[in-house]
Image (spheres, grey):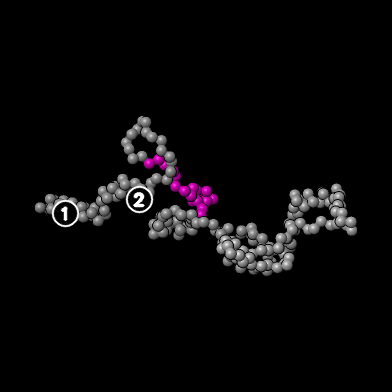
Amino acid sequence: MDEEISFVRTQSPIIEGFKRTLFVRSEPEVPVDEDCQIIPPPKPTGEDISNFYLSLTLKLPPPLEDTSKKWICEECGESIDHNVSKEQHESAFSHRLSTHGARKQYHIQESNKGYRMLKNMSWNEEQGLGARNQGTLDPIKTQLRRDKSGLGKKDLPYRVTHFPNQVPLQKSIKKDRISQRDLEAMRKERDKIIKHAVYH
């Protein structure tokens, strides 16, 4: 009857279907002797108490790995298992990410003449210009002023401001420029007027 689980069937719909289970003690039964006297547990020694507290607080360091069977990649500095070949490691995502990193974006089109000239002269985008690649990589930060005030001007934060799509004045200047074709037409017209005036 102790281990048996039974359904309770009563008239009440609230209790119907509930299970009755055996009560289980959370602690082991207390040992008793022949006279039904409780046997006291043995007193712990100082060493037992010390070991108990050390097991709670002191965590042993993880065992050291055998590094004799590993090799270190010179490019990324990662320790690699001896079973992995150099080609396999170099094709791994972790190696490529640590060596290349995120590519710097300059927002210059590759069709730009200056950009192509630098690339043809073996310029690397990750390095600055100069004999020792010591040049700056980012544009110089400036203050863009859209007003004509002199004294008493507002102090604006320094940032990269001069991009063609952000400065409307630059667009209007480009529209006002005379194209090379128009200059040639104007020169021809002038020469025609001079020739007509001189020879007639």
User: Disc 2 marks which amino acid?
Assistant: Asn
Is residue 131 in the magenta section? yes
Q: Please name the predominant secondary structure of the magenta segment in the image.
A: loop
Residue 67, magenta (yes or no): no
Q: Which residue is mark 1?
A: 192
Reading the chain from its start, which is encountered first: label 1 or label 2? 2
**Kind of residue at badge 1:** Lys
Cα distance between the residues tagged 1 and 2 = 41 Å
In this orientation, which residue lies closer to the viewer: 169 or 65? 65
Magenta span of residues: 126-144
- Residue 174 percent location from the top left of the image: 29, 50
- Residue at the (42%, 45%) spot, across then down: 160
On screen, residue 131 versus residue 82, left or right, reads left
What residue would you read off at disc 2?
165
Label 2 Cα neighbours within 10 Å, binned few <14 / some 14-19 / many ≥20: few
Picture quadrant where residue 157 is located: top left
Q: Is residue 158 visible?
A: yes
